[in-house]
Amino acid sequence: MPVPSEYRSWRSVPASHFIDPLMRQLGHPYYVGFLSAAEVHGAAHQRPQVFQVVTPARLQGRAFGRVRIEFITEARAATRPTATVNTPTGTMQVAIPEVTVLDLVAAPERGGGLSNVATVAAELVGEGRLDGQALAIAAGTYPIAVAQRTGWLLDHVARMLATSFDTGPLAERAGERAEPTPLAASGRRAGTLDGRWNVLVNTAIEPDL
């Protein structure tokens, strides 16, 4: 693929220009996810250092000049709802905003930590980009603990924004789990218990609002 002059110093075009034909050539379903999806949805404060792609396949990361692609293996990737987004060279599959939030809550280390995940969630809530029913449906492909943490986080950022977001449909999904879930999965199993989500708030969340 020819490299336009504006990307000559990169020695490659952006990954969004070629990820779809690359994945079709490899024969694997995929979606652009995590902070790369957040950027597409206008909810990333800065450009991610790597282009994050979710796929059922086990693939090694690849580098094309300054462009780095991180492949994240997820067996249920093909079942999660995506949006077809136009690119300068065609289209690509991108996680819908609801899947973007769920992915980031499920693996906050891929999103710069829980506080940065909360920043992304706040951007999406504030811009009205999330739908409560779509969120609950998408949550069906994640562990219930992820639904619990996501619900708590969205309620938290909505309060900070002095706005509201309907987490009721998600609460029905999260209510299927009786055991308390720590907000930070790697943290200690102690903290203030949030009764609605059955989440142990064991870390401070400080989004950049």
Image: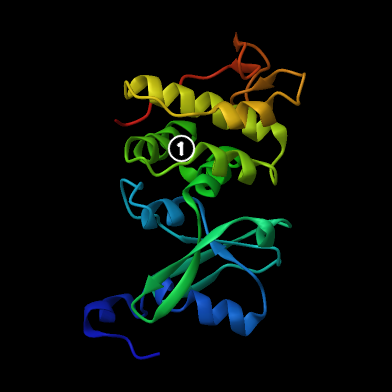
Which of the pair 53/141 is nearer the observer? 141
Residue, x 48% and y 36% (percent of image)? 113
Instruction: Judge from the rendering whether residue 39 lies leftward or rightward of residue 28; answer left or right.
Output: left
Instruction: Judge from the rendering whether residue 134 lies leftward or rightward of residue 117; answer left or right.
Output: right
Asked if 81 appears above or below 199 in the picture, the reply is below
Q: Position of residue 63 (x, y in %)?
A: 49, 73
Quarter of the image with the N terminus is bottom left
Q: Position of residue 121 (x, y in %)?
A: 43, 37
Q: Position of residue 77 (x, y in %)?
A: 66, 58
Asked if 100 appears above or below 52 in the picture, the reply is above
Which of the pair 27/86 is nearer the observer? 86
* Image coloring type: rainbow
Which of the pair 191/188 is nearer the observer? 191
Asked if 190 appears above or below 183 in the picture, the reply is above
Amino acid type of the residue that numbered disc 1 sits on in the rendered structure: Val
Asked if 57 appears above or below 159 in the picture, the reply is below
Q: Position of residue 206 (x, y in %)?
A: 39, 24
Quarter of the image with the C terminus is top left
Marks counted in the figure total 1
Residue, x 76% and y 19% (percent of image)? 179
* Residue 188 sits in quarter: top right
**Disc 1 crowd, CA 10 A, few/some/many (<14, 14-19, 20+):** many
In terms of secondary structure, where does tag 1 sit? helix
Residue, x 75% and y 26% (percent of image)? 176
Residue at label 1? Answer: 117
